[in-house]
């Protein structure tokens, strides 16, 4: 696991460069696979940088294929707090990406169809050549995507129950009155990625970052599973690195 200590803005520029490089590699058949993308405040500087590069004409959007990490369930497709709306507003809409280039977990699918929906999501990722570059954040309790403490490292896309701390910090209107469950890719889905980038900004992430990098591998801190991956880059600002040696 490689640590790069830098500001959120510097991280955004570097990861945007990696995304740009990935798209170029796909276009020229040097690589295959899709992007795995997060939501929330952490990736906002990255998405702003990608919009800027698209305006400058440096992104090859013909090669774009991406999947999102997670989604509240049940929600409403038009809800401003849904991750689909977030991504459409912050990235996919401005980039003008067509629906066949982006993969979402549904926040309105019937409970009886959840199992097949999750299986199809995994199949769609595989059909896209797997995940070439996974960009993720780490939760204050060590969760990755919505894989809360206790999640099995072999887990795949599924419905999960959210912890109270995650719900309080989720940004969903109503906090604890918002959805108590969510759909998320599994830890195994993340670990299958050829390359993983972890973004961590702010002192609130310092404890989770320390555990992720230096704690004993444990289901109590899902992020520790990344210690087993051969290609992980951690991009963290000074505040997030406050507890690191």
Image (cartoon, helix red, strand yellow):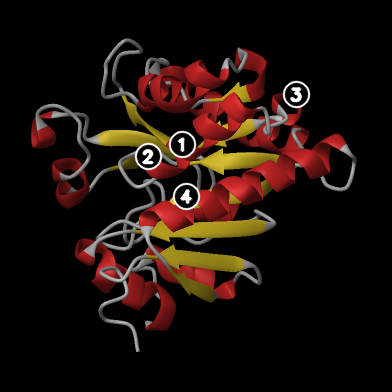
The answer for how far apart the CA atoms under marks 3 and 2 are is 23 Å
Residue density around tag 3, few if under 14, some if 14–19, many if 20 or more, within 10 Å: few
Say what secondary structure mark 4 lies in: helix
Residue at x-position 67% and y-position 42%: 20
Residue at x-position 36% and y-position 46%: 146
Q: Which residue is mark 2?
A: 44
Say what secondary structure mark 2 lies in: helix
The answer for how far apart the CA atoms under marks 1 and 3 are is 18 Å
Question: Which numbered disc flags the more N-terminal residue, 1 or 3?
Answer: 1
Quadrant (top left/top right/bottom left/bottom right) for the C terminus: bottom left
Question: Which numbered disc flags the more N-terminal residue, 2 or 4?
Answer: 4
Question: Which numbered disc flags the more N-terminal residue, 3 or 4?
Answer: 4
State whether residue 214 is above or below residue 54: below
Say what secondary structure mark 3 lies in: helix
Mark 1 touching mark 2, by CB under 8 A?
yes
Q: Which residue is mark 3?
A: 62
Q: Position of residue 206 (x, y in %)?
A: 26, 70
The answer for how far apart the CA atoms under marks 3 and 4 are is 22 Å
Q: Which residue is mark 4?
A: 12
Q: Position of residue 117 (x, y in %)?
A: 54, 24
């Amino acid at each position: 696991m490689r640590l790069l200590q830098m500001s959120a803005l510097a991280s955004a520029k570097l990861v945007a460069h990696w995304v740009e490089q990935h798209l170029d590699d796909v276009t020229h058949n040097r690589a295959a696979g899709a992007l795995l993308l997060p939501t929330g405040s952490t990736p906002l500087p990255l998405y702003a940088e990608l919009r800027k590069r698209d305006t400058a004409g440096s992104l090859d959007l013909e090669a774009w294929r991406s999947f999102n990490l997670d989604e509240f369930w049940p929600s409403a497709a038009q809800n401003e707090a849904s991750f689909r709306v977030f991504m459409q507003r912050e990235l996919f809409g401005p980039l003008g990406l067509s629906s066949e280039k982006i993969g979402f977990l549904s926040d309105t699918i019937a409970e009886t169809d959840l199992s097949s929906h999750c299986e199809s999501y995994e199949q769609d990722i595989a059909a896209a050549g797997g995940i070439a570059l996974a960009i993720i954040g780490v939760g204050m309790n060590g969760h990755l995507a919505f894989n809360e403490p206790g999640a099995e490292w072999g887990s795949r896309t599924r419905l999960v129950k959210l912890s109270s701390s995650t719900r309080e910090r989720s940004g969903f209107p109503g906090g604890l009155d918002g959805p108590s469950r969510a759909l998320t890719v599994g830890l195994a889905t993340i670990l299958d990625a050829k390359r993983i980038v972890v973004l961590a900004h702010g002192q609130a992430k310092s404890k989770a970052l320390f555990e992720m990098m230096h704690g004993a591998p444990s289901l109590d801190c899902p992020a520790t599973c990344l210690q087993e991956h051969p290609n992980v880059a951690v991009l963290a600002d000074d505040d997030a690195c406050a507890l690191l040696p």
